[in-house]
Structures are given as C-alpha cells and as structure tokens.
Image: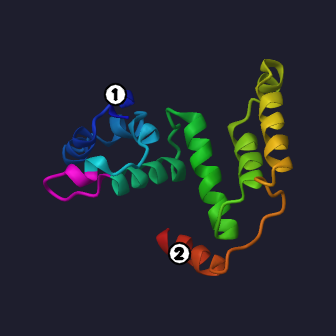
Amino acid sequence: MTYFMDYLPHEVIRSVQLGLYSELLHSSTMWVCSTCATCATRCPNGIDVTGFMDFLKNKILSGNIQPKQKEVAAFHQAFLDEIKRHGRINEFVMMAHFSRKRGGLWKRLMDGELKADMKLGLEMFRKGRLKPIPKKAAGAAEVKDMFKRRR
C-alpha cells in the first residue's frame, strides 16, 4: 500500500519527530494504511507504526481537520461507531451509517452506485449473510467502557 501514500511509514515517524504535524494530518497516508503491520514488524526500533496511524486517524476525526480521503474516513468512523454501540459489527447497520456519513445520496442515486449497493445488499440478505437487526456482543458494555477510557 505504500505506493499510494504521500509519506512512507518511516517518514510519518520522522515528521512527528520534526514537529511537522500539519502536513502529516492533511495527507492521505493514514487513510490508505491497511494496518497490515508490515512496517511495524520490519521497524528496527520496534515502533508500533500501525497503532500510530490509528492514533492519527482518530486525531483527525476528533478535531476540526478535514480528512483528505473523505470516504475512507467516513467508513472508519462508521466502523468504530458500530463497535461502540453494539460491541461488534453489524454490516447492515454499519453500511447504512456509512452511506449516511459519506453523503452525496443524490449523486450516488443518479450514478447508479446506490442501486448497485442495494442490489448487493439484497443478494447478501437472501443468502443469510446480512442481518438487519443487530445483536449486542456479550462484552458490549466492556467495549463501550474501553472507548470511554480511551478519550
């Protein structure tokens, strides 16, 4: 994934060391990071680069910074919100939440993208792969507490 990044993982760490936060927070690097942990595994200094990328994503989402990759940021936020709410992911609810967060409903309707999404969702529902009613995880309260402590 590094070929899609404005900054390579080691450049992210170096930018922080040099205090170049603004440039870093306005880049798309952390949004295209797939959290594969290859950089963290290879890091000779044992830096948890993937954890740091997550930190940067959350910093952007909690501040007044406009993410460079808006759709990826909307998906990330919808994913985290769903885990906070239910302690697990319910694809149906998460995708509805994501669709609302990313906006552009009219454009997606006119492009046929929304119709394709609905067709895929219906097919998944028929095959039993999509459950419209979310179930709470056994440890949902603990997960919620974890998010509260993290703030």
Q: Earlier in the sequence, mark 1 or mark 2?
A: 1
Q: Is 72 situated above or below 114?
A: below
Nearer to the camera, 87 or 59: 87
Range shown magenta: 40-49
Q: Quarter holding the N terminus?
A: top left
State the residue at coordinates (74%, 40%).
Answer: 99
Let me know if residue 36 appears in the view: yes
Q: Position of residue 96 (x, y in %)?
A: 77, 47
Residue identifier under label 2: 146
Measured Cα–Cα span from mark 1 to mark 2: 34 Å
Asked if disc 1 and disc 2 are in contact, CB closer than 8 Å, the reply is no
Dominant secondary structure (helix, strand or loop) of the stretch shown in magenta: loop
Let me know if residue 105 appears in the view: no
Q: Position of residue 20 (x, y in %)?
A: 27, 40
Q: Is 41 situated above or below 27?
A: below
Other residues around mark 2 within 10 Å, as few (<14) / some (14–19) / many (≥20)? few
State the residue at coordinates (83%, 19%).
Answer: 110
Residue identifier under label 1: 3
Report the residue that reaches farthest toward the left: 44
Q: Position of residue 117 (x, y in %)?
A: 77, 34
Q: Secondary structure at mark 1?
A: helix
- Label 1 is placed on what type of residue? Tyr
- Label 2 is placed on what type of residue? Met
